[in-house]
Every structure is written in C-alpha cells, then in structure tokens.
Image (spheres, helix red, strand yellow):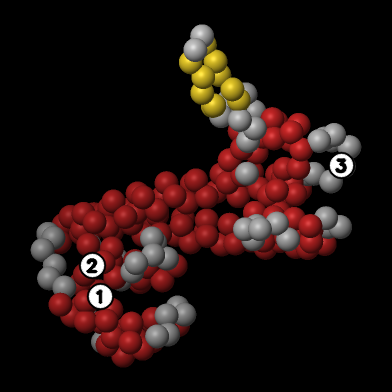
Amino acid sequence: ETLKLLGISHERLKKEHTRYTNRLLFIIRQYFPLYDALFSETAPKILLKMVLKYPIWAKLKTESHEDLKKFFIANKFCNRKYIEIKLKKINDYVHNVAGEVETALSFETTTIANILLMLKDQIDQIEKEMAKITDNHFLGKVFDSLPGAGALLAGKLLGLIGDNKHRFSNANQAQCLFGTAPMNYQSGGYHKVITRKACNKRGKSIL
C-alpha cells in the first residue's frame, strides 16, 4: 500500500517538475538564451544553481574563469574538457536583452529554480524510499528480475499488482484490468483490433 501511494505521489511530482521545467526554459529563452545552450540535459541541477547564483548576465560576465571552474567542479561537473567548452560559450556570448527586461524576468526565474530544486530533492527521496521497500519485500527480487524493470519501475509494479497471489486466477485477468489485453471490434465485414479503454489507467500507463 505504501509503495502504491508513493508511486502515485512520484507521478504527480514528476508532472509538476515537467510543468515548472517548461516554464523555466520558456522564460530563460526570452532573456538569457545562453543558459539554454550551455547544457544538453533539460534543467539539470547545475543549471538551476547557476540561475540562482548568476540570475543576470551582469553577474555572470564579471566572474573569473577560475571561480567558474570551481563552481562547475563543486556541482559535480568535473570533466575539464567540457568545462572549457562551457567557458568558451560564455566568453563568446553576446547579450542583447534590455537590462529592465532581464531584471524583471530574473525574479520569476529564481523562484522557479528554487521550486525545481525542492521538487528534485523530494522525487529523489521518494525513489530511494520505494527502492528500500522493494528490496526488503519478499517479492522484491522477482519484480527486480523483470526485463527492463529498474529500481523505480519494479517498485511501481509491485505496488500496482500487490502480493496477494489469489487476486488473479490467470494472466488474462490482469491484462484485462490493466488494459494490455487487445479487444476485437467487428461490424459486418469490418474487423480490427483495438486497445482496451475500460481499465485501470494508471496500471496501463505503468505497464
């Protein structure tokens, strides 16, 4: 039961994380496109911390290369080659946004960055707790052994299916409940196979 509820919370927080990430990137592209170009990953922690430490170009451009290197290394970005690439991008950047616009939008950006850091920490905590419960459960190894099931997915599957072996008398019952069993649709000479809509939507999504 705890695994199931943690899984639901995890999915809700991930949706919120995606929503705030999209909002952050939308604002950054308006007033500080350099940050969008620095990292290939979408809103990694180092970008959020960079936004908080250097919310406007005036603060970033006055920072020395040595201090920037220390910042990157302190935030687990230790590859010297990639650090040099980032520093070159910062050096070559030409800022063409009015100071008034930059200052106004930076307030919202720093607020969202703080929210995203908090969400990331909470999501990490939930994933650790789910992995801990799965590892200590007598069926944990069974779900961990499923092809393609990592620690997070194994926990969600265990929370979804449960440990009551009498819940389903055969595999088809589980397929029908979770929407993975195909359905035949026929009208006159027309026939096609469709997916099941009347089902446990969360179970279908997980599977």
Circle 1/circle 2 CB separation < 8 Å: yes
Q: Amino acid at mark 1?
A: Leu
Q: Say which of marks 1 and 3 sits in front.
A: 3
Residue at 70% from the left image edge and 31% from the top image edge = 177
Q: Which residue is mark 3?
A: 164
How many marks the image carries: the answer is 3
Q: Which residue is mark 1?
A: 60
Q: In the picture, which quadrant includes the C terminus?
A: top right
Q: CA distance from mark 3 to mark 2?
A: 53 Å
Depth check, front residue: 203 or 146: 146
Residue at 47% from the left image edge and 51% from the top image edge = 17
Q: Amino acid at mark 3?
A: Asn
Q: Which residue is mark 2?
A: 34
Q: Position of residue 97 (x, y in %)?
A: 13, 60
Depth check, front residue: 60 or 166: 166
Q: Amino acid at mark 2?
A: Leu
